[in-house]
Amino acid sequence: MTNLLSNSDARRVFLAKQGLSAPPNRALTKQGLLQLIHDLGFVQVDSIQTVERAHHQILFSRNQTYRREHLKALLEKERALFEHWTHDASILPSAFFVYWKHKFRHQEKVLIERWRKWRGEGFEAAFEETYERVQRDGAMLARDVKADGHVSGGWWNWHPNKTALEYFWHTGKLAIAGRSNFQKIYDLTERVIPAEFREPEVTREDFVDWACRSALTRLGFATHGEIAAFWNLVSPDEAKAWVSAHRDELTEVLIEPALGDKARASWAFADFFATLDSYPAAPPRIRVLSPFDPMIRDRNRTERLFGFFYRIEVFVPEAKREYGYYVFPLLEGDRLIGRIDMKADRKKSTLDVRRLWLEPGVKPSAGRLERLEAELERVARFAGVEKVVLLEGWRG
């Protein structure tokens, strides 16, 4: 028998799984931060700092007492976290490193051919020399090994040593020891990742089981495609086979979509409905989300659950943008109610709000606008600027 899950219950479960239902003012310790990242699974890293970098904003949107120095200590001193790839560069618990070793082995097989097409024949000429230099001289930035006269041009024009550093990072021989002005500092993996996180070796079967089981735990309910996409570690076919092999532990759930379309069949653990009442409602306050927030990473899932169509327009030509370069979704309680275009002007120490778009049917009531302005004040303080400036025409 397949059970129907109402849209409101689906949103309540997913927001709780995403850490967005906990009290946002409860003091967050360093250990609590590590647990939050563990429960989320990963926090995406991105260099854009329109207001604040993505990883900081993702964590701040869940807890306003989040401290950047705690994240830095967990990454660079205690080594309880490490940086690597899910769908994009992300911060992950070091306890997951043993599973990423399977990703490294896969990357070794595919990157050489893929990068040869991208970089051309002979692109790996500096590999051996670069690895030996890191081995001999220790942690370094890409600029420390840059050949004289090379003009950098972003990822499409890496110099040969930078290509080598990135290849060895993607395949697990190097790790990120820290960052300097957001530039990666590379070192040997064994000098960065503590030994207890590099062992033991995990079988392929146990790896697939962990990848699927941990994904479903963090999603609450999912199709086999969503299970595979969560970490980007296993294929949809592997996730489908895992579901088939573990049917006795699972129950089929029909998820009611936000916009009245056909209910979507998904999977959840067998105790899902027995524990449904344990998930709290999200706080009613308004929160600004990062465009890279894990809650909205799967844009199709976001649209089904919340009736909210969102695409980041960073790579869209300006004339074709519907909203703007870097526009932030707004979450109110369990609803995505709109988006906002804003930028921190650090010279003037202002958070400049350019434009607000509310979703159809969401009224700009006095109470809602007060809650929005309260959130903007919180974001401004977190970004280190003194005041919020609502620019002319910001209401649209």
Image: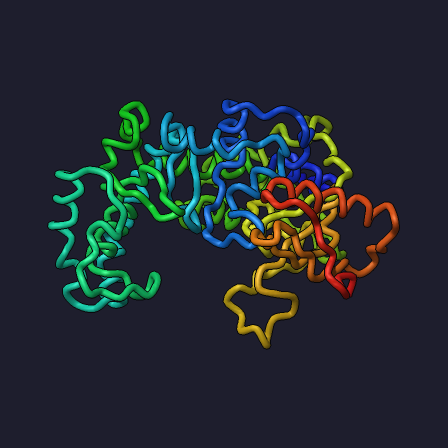
Kindly identify the residue that appears in the image at 62 percent across and 46 percent down.
385
> In the image, 300: left or right of 41?
right
Colour scheme: rainbow
Quarter of the image where the N terminus is located: top right
Where residue 363 sits, quadrant-wise, is bottom right
Kindly identify the residue that appears in the image at 36 percent across and 44 percent down.
180
In percent of width and height, residue 136 lies at 12, 38
Kindly identify the residue that appears in the image at 29 percent across and 26 percent down.
194
Q: Nearer the viewer, residue 357 or 294?
A: 357
Q: Residue furthest front?
A: 348
Q: Nearer the viewer, residue 141 or 82?
A: 141
Q: Residue furthest right?
A: 366
Say if residue 237 shows up in the picture: no
Q: Is residue 281 above or below residue 53?
A: above
In percent of width and height, residue 273 lies at 68, 31
Q: Nearer the viewer, residue 160 or 388?
A: 388
In percent of width and height, residue 243 lies at 49, 40
Q: Residue furthest bottom?
A: 319
> In the image, 211: left or right of 203?
right
Say if residue 1 shows up in the picture: yes
Q: How many marks?
A: 0
Kindly identify the residue that appears in the image at 78 percent across and 61 percent down.
395
Where residue 204 sits, quadrant-wise, is top left
Q: Nearer the viewer, residue 366 or 124?
A: 366
Q: Is residue 321 above or below residue 98?
A: below
In percent of width and height, residue 112 lies at 22, 57
Quarter of the image where the C terminus is located: bottom right
